[in-house]
Amino acid sequence: MATGTYSMQASALRAKQYALIDGRPCQIIRASFSNDECHLEVKDLFLGNEFKATFHQDDNVEVPNVDRTEYSLVNIDDGMLNLMAQDGNPKDDLSTPNNDLGTQIKEDFESGKEMLG
């Protein structure tokens, strides 16, 4: 078992969860069950490839421990995003992307839209 993972029975896997399929970190797009099989449609998180995997429902599948932290956008200063975690810890080491997403972030922030991510 890889570090930072735990085992979960294939029958317990659901859409939007993460799993290691053939050693690759994937997000489950669809999970369906028939007879004693679990059919997964997944997307490789790093390569973007979508593929299918089939397991017996009682097979163990490695699932990564995922820590998620949401931040509020507090300010944009000289192209840097000033973020605040829910616990009050600041994060200010992200620059505004130089693309359509960056433009949208700036416009939404300037219009007063609450920004979480």
Image (tube, rainbow, N blue to C red):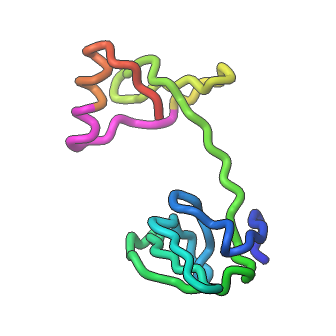
Q: Is residue 99 magenta?
A: yes
**Which of 13/5 is in front?**
13
Q: Position of residue 2 (x, y in %)?
A: 75, 74
Taking depth in this image into account, of 85 and 17 the one nearest to the observer is: 17
Q: Where's residue 11, x and y in %?
A: 67, 72
Residue at 68% in and 63% down:
64
Q: Which residues are magenta?
A: 93-104
Side of 4 relative to 68 (left or right): right
On the question of residue 68 being in view, the answer is yes
Is residue 9 depicted above or below 71 in this figure?
Answer: below
Q: Position of residue 72 (x, y in %)?
A: 50, 24
Q: Horizontal and vertical percent for residue 58?
A: 74, 81
Residue 41, above or below 75: below
Q: In the figure, is residue 109 to the left or right of 25?
A: left
Residue 24, quarter of picture: bottom right
Residue drawn at point x = 53 percent, y = 69 percent: 26
Q: Residue at x 41, y 18 (%)?
A: 75
Residue at the extreme top: 112
